[in-house]
Amino acid sequence: MKLYYRLLVQFMGKGFMFVAVHPLDFWMYLVGKIIRMAFFFVFIFSIFRVAPEFAGYNFATGILIFVTYNFIDILSQTFFFRGLYHLQELVRRGTFDRALTYPISPLFYTAFRMPDPMDFISLVPVLMLLGWALTQFAQLLTPLAILLYILLVANGLLIAFALCTFLASLTFFTQEMEGVWWFYRYAVQVGRYPVEIFRSPFQFILTWVIPLGVMITFPSRALLGILSWQFVGGALVLSALLFYVALSFWRFALRRYSSASS
């Protein structure tokens, strides 16, 4: 475990070195991301200005879901999304063979080898929005609600890791993965909206099949104290199941990987 922690720190250090070498790229990327978030904030504000309540949510709770989406999206991109996405380049160039010789998990190396601290720094405006949202319903907050929110955000990250691992495993069977990854990115962006705005059966599908509701809406509802323990348990079971399936599929796909030298 210490080895993996040290490697993660080293990988993150290399990411910061890249930022230091390319400061203009960093600031352009950061400003662009903040502008994109600002436009969506204005979009939410415009909706709730016309309709003070939307699918049972008001402006503050809408911002909370938006913040939760950004937490999970930014942290996943910071630590493991890019590594798993770029697995196709390692396989295409034949350099993934070298990763198999390292005395560490190939999945760990693949996922965490190229973290992006630029995304991590963009959490600052997200935290500011969260602070504002929390002041709007401070009377509803309890230590248990805050703990459940943190737990379910971590649970959402685990689901995101499982889904990305499953998609990355497909790389060992086909190199035509761009469309699949873009579908994943567009699907996750739907999580910026409460699943309650969709009709059945799409609401069920976006909650449990494409588990955006479990990833993003559930933490927000737990913080507000409106998520039952049955749904909390269901969310934890679902993440554990998806993680097990993703790891099993990764091992299955890896056994069928034909190295560049074979």
Image (cartoon, rainbow, N blue to C red):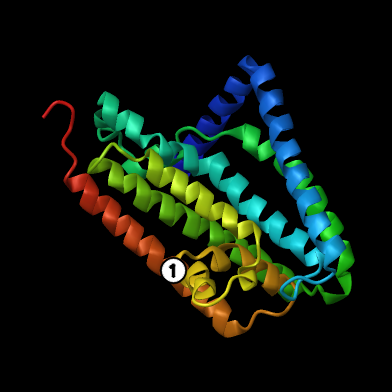
- Front one among 170 and 94: 170
Q: Is residue 125 above or below residue 96?
A: below
Q: Is residue 257 above or below residue 231?
A: above
Q: Residues within 10 Å of mark 1 (few under 14, many from 20)?
A: few
Helix, strand or loop status at disc 1: helix
Residue position marked by numbered label 1 in the rendering: 209
Instruction: Give me the residue at 57% from left, 67% from top.
Output: 213
Instruction: Give me the residue at 42% from left, 39% from top.
Output: 85
Residue 43 location (% of width, % of height): 77, 52
- Front one among 11 and 190: 190
Residue 57 location (% of width, % of height): 76, 71
Instruction: Give me the residue at 42% from left, 55% from top.
Output: 163
Residue lying furthest left in this view?
262
Q: Is residue 65 visible?
A: yes
Q: Quadrant of the C terminus?
A: top left
Residue 224 location (% of width, % of height): 75, 74
Residue lying furthest top in this view?
21
Q: Is residue 174 above or below residue 239?
A: above
Left or right position of 65 against 186: right
**Amino acid under disc 1:** Val
How many numbered dots are placed on residues in this image? 1
Left or right position of 134 against 113: right
Residue 156 location (% of width, % of height): 55, 61
- Front one among 49 and 90: 49
Left or right position of 109 against 249: right
Q: Is residue 151 visible?
A: no
Instruction: Give me the residue at 35% from left, 57% from top.
Output: 246
Left or right position of 111 against 95: right
Q: Is residue 66 above or below residue 51?
A: above
